[in-house]
């Protein structure tokens, strides 16, 4: 019946810039999902329809104590209703991210590959429609090209209320402007804009955005011996899942540097659970928050920027100073 995916032995080391990809098939094509998002694999079962739902939402089922929404990936990807197959290879991938569980119906599971984030490329914009592709990246797994789907974007399109809500900032009322410089590493164009706009609305005026951890690291690494480093960067916010370099690797590199280590790092990711929290703590993250808690993020930023200002006189001077 149910096959638990306990992920034992996966990514025992933190900050190695590697990812475990679970490969699966939909309509004959290979797709992938970060194993960190997978709670369980189950044989498909009866789903109770949900009236007036998005066409990709089949309905819900209750495997144990929790109601879980089922999304038919074939329907979502094709834009046309695809009836569930009456075959034993028809499976549910039960995911757990953004503090919620969602089941995705797929045709089959084709194993797990461990690869470096440097082997994952962002899809060319010509391959996407709208603001951005629904793919986090294209991975080379052996002789297969695997499209890693952006499951957060899929859920956000179907249920916008599950993603970042700028209304949380509105509820804070009038806030003072803050010009302390912030670096944001986030590969999703959609979330880049949402986080940037929300922080701007909260009064933060100096936000430099990078598309992945590698771009952010190149920028920070170029500043580490700058005598004006602490005028250029006061805080770093990073996602975890990013092509080229993930957030754990970026955090580790920052915290291993004698000057950059003083800059607070906030991991802001849909993947924050007990296991991932321990990994973030291991690489030295100052704070770790789950998307879409944008209001909480603002409060955390306020505290970290204040602490940074109070302590910056104690930080290491640049090399040769």
Image (cartoon, rainbow, N blue to C red):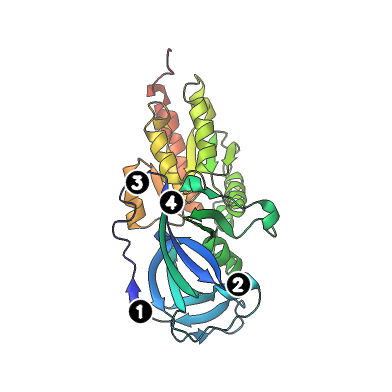
Q: Which mark is residue 76?
A: 2
Q: Which mark is residue 115?
A: 4
Query: Does the image show residue 204?
Result: no
Q: Which one is in front in this view, the residue at disc 1 or the one at disc 2?
A: 2
User: Which tag, 2 or 4, sits closer to the chain's start?
Assistant: 2
Q: Which one is in front in this view, the residue at disc 3 or the one at disc 4?
A: 4
The residues tagged by marks 3 and 1 sit, at their Cα atoms, a distance apart of 33 Å
Q: Which mark is residue 158?
A: none
The residues tagged by marks 1 and 4 sit, at their Cα atoms, a distance apart of 35 Å
The residues tagged by marks 2 and 4 sit, at their Cα atoms, a distance apart of 27 Å
Residue 96, percent from left and from top: 42, 65
What residue is at 39 percent from the left and 45 percent from the top? 287
Foreground residue, 20 or 59? 20
Determine whether the residue tagged by mark 2 lies in a helix, strand or loop: helix
> Is residue 199 rendered to the left or right of residue 274?
right
User: Which tag, 1 or 2, sits closer to the chain's start?
Assistant: 1
Q: Give the vertical position of 104 relative to 225 (above or below).
A: below
Residue 155, percent from left and from top: 55, 66
Q: Residues within 10 Å of mark 4 (few under 14, many from 20)?
A: some
What residue is at 60 percent from the left and 79 percent from the top? 53
Q: Which mark is residue 65?
A: 1
> Is residue 270 rendered to the left or right of residue 51?
left
Q: Which one is in front in this view, the residue at disc 1 or the one at disc 4?
A: 4
Q: Which one is in front in this view, the residue at disc 3 or the one at disc 1?
A: 3
């Amino acid at each position: 019946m149910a096959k638990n995916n306990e992920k034992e032995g996966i990514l025992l080391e933190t900050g190695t810039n590697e990812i475990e990809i679970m490969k699966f098939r939909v309509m004959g094509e290979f797709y992938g999902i970060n194993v960190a998002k997978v709670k369980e694999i189950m044989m498909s079962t009866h789903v109770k329809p949900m009236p007036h739902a998005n066409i990709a939402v089949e309905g819900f089922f209750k495997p144990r104590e929790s109601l879980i929404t089922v999304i038919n990936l074939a329907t979502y990807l094709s834009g046309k209703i695809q009836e569930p197959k009456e075959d034993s290879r028809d499976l549910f991938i039960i995911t757990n991210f953004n503090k919620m569980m969602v089941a995705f119906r797929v045709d089959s599971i084709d194993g797990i590959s461990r690869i470096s984030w440097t082997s994952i490329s962002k899809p060319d914009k010509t391959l996407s429609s709208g603001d951005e592709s629904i793919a986090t990246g294209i991975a080379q797994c052996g002789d297969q090209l695997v499209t890693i789907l952006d499951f957060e974007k899929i859920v956000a399109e179907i249920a916008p209320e599950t993603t970042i809500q700028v209304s949380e900032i509105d509820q804070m009322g009038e806030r003072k402007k803050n010009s302390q410089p912030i670096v944001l590493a986030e590969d999703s164009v959609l979330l880049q804009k949402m986080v940037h706009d929300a922080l701007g609305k909260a009064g933060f005026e100096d936000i430099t955005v990078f598309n992945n951890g590698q771009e952010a690291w190149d920028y920070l690494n170029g500043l580490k011996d700058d005598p004006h480093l602490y005028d250029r960067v006061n805080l770093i916010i990073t996602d975890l899942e990013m092509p080229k370099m993930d957030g754990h690797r970026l955090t580790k590199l920052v915290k291993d540097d004698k000057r950059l280590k003083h800059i607070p790092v906030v991991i802001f990711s849909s993947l924050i659970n007990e296991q991932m929290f321990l990994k973030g703590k291991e690489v030295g993250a100052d704070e770790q928050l789950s998307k879409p808690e944008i209001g909480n993020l603002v409060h955390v930023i306020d505290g970290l920027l204040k602490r940074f200002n109070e302590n910056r006189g104690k930080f290491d001077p640049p090399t040769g100073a």
